[in-house]
Amino acid sequence: MEPCSQCLVLLQRLAELEAKVEQLSRANDELRRLLEDARRGGKRQAAPFRKGPPKANPKTPGRKSGEQHGQHGQRPPPDGAFDQVLEANLPVACPYCFGNLVETHTDQQTQVDLPRQPLRRLINIHCGKCQTCHATVRGHHPQQTSDATGAAAHQVGPDAQAAVVILNKDCGLSHAKVAKVMTRLLGIPLTRGASSQIVLRAGQRLEGAYQEILGQLPVHDWLSVDETGWRIGGHPAWLHVWVGARATAYAIDPQRDADRLEQVIGIDWTGTLVHDGWSSYDRFDCAMHQQCQAHVLVRAKELAAAAVGRAKVFPRQVIKLCQASLATRDQFEAGQLDAAALEQARQEYVGQLLDLTSRPRTNAANETFARHLYHYAEQWFTFLETPGLPATNWPAEQATRPAVVNRKVWGGNRTPDGAHAQEVTMSVLATCKQLTLSALDYVSQALRHIAPKLFPLPIAVAGANQ
């Protein structure tokens, strides 16, 4: 007996459902495997630094041939006069046949080495008394960081104190390791407590430079901003970083919102804010916004990897659109496009993104992603409207790395005073690097109250990107 037409329809529907169940089962198994790999990998000590399995066709190590060869990294000869001149004399006889040797020429080799003997400095402070008002007057040498005598007369010099600040805040060494470096390598006895007090003192002496940096941020054409988790005395906090073309500022605050940034640049700031899309930055209505394209690409690639079937199409379209816009920027910078073509391309990319994200989608993850892209459609391509503007917030991301190293070492700061010293010293060190100033010299001068202003000339708004 042949099945009826209704039975045939049901059998066909059953076969389709069985195929769908099989497909979902395979996807579920794959997701379970990825989840288990992530769980197992997170328990390894090196989990934060893992890059996954090696590439199938890795690039050849070493220098590239042709124009990409690059400069050689030979060490240049040391500047200035030599502290030591040593002679590597010929042996008395040939080491191979014991014959007589006749000197033919002299080769030279230079070295730069650690000073094994620290500089010990004695400062005689001449004291006197005024014959008229009977006031006591004491001399002060520029090398002094303090006028203390008596029990506090034996101190660490300004250059050594500046080195402590750099080792702790820039190199990420704990106070205990800083003390070991100073004691064992440089011969300057130091304790953890002394290292901590040096950093706190540096934070106080660098307060004026920190206020200079904050005062320069509003005159920049663009600011790249980001934030990362922090702790003060074990309590949750946030470390904010604001990077301009010539200044970098850090601020530690209990909240993640943009209140501190608003206090610095003002709510009516008219520059361009480059950020990762955190909604708190939307309050700056007068500013232009550049949403980070790197975050979009990462999110789209993750969606494409986790999606099944046609759900992969949308994130792949987003990736293609973003990569095309970045390629257009590269063509403009190479001189292949003019400003008019760049603006036309920007409008086209905005229109394509609106068309791509305006229609509803059955996949929930893709729908959420599409709504986010649609809401900020024009903010993804501001870098095409303002040549030279970063397409991502990589300057801020890079600036958070020293702070992340500090956080991995000791988790944050123990006190509010330590947190303030953290934001002050890190801001000064990062800005000195941008201005090509010696951070060691500047911090040393600040500890001696003779540091010049970081910005002796005001920054013109038009020249902030130069």
Image (spheres, grey):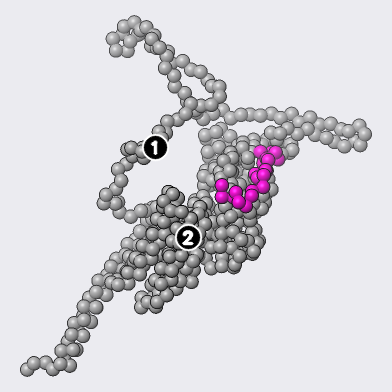
Residue at 42% across, 17% down: 107
In the rendered image, residue 353, in percent from the top left (x then y), is placed at 42, 68
Horizontal arrangement in the rendering, residue 386 relative to residue 70 (left or right)? right
Q: Which mark is on residue 70?
A: 1
Q: Which of marks 2 and 1 is nearer the N terminus?
A: 1
In the figure, 265 relative to 139: above or below? Answer: below
Q: Which quarter of the picture shows residue 24? A: bottom left
- Name the amino acid, label 2: Glu
Residue at 34% across, 65% down: 316
Q: Which quarter of the picture shows residue 308? A: bottom left
Q: Is mark 1 on a helix, strand or loop?
A: loop
Q: Outermost residue, top direction?
A: 100
In the rendered image, residue 89, in percent from the top left (x then y), is placed at 42, 13
Q: Give the range drawn in magenta.
A: 445-466
Q: Nearer the viewer, residue 423 or 177?
A: 423
Q: Outermost residue, left direction?
A: 1
Residue at 8% across, 92% down: 2
In the figure, 291 relative to 7: above or below? Answer: above
Q: Nearer the viewer, residue 152 or 128?
A: 128
Residue at 56% across, 62% down: 288
Residue highlighted by disc 2: 343
Q: Which of 163 and 409 is in front in this view?
A: 163
Q: In which quarter of the image is the N terminus?
A: bottom left
In the rendered image, residue 279, in percent from the top left (x then y), is placed at 53, 68
Q: Is mark 2 on a helix, strand or loop?
A: helix
**Which one is in front in this view, the residue at disc 2 or the one at disc 1?**
2
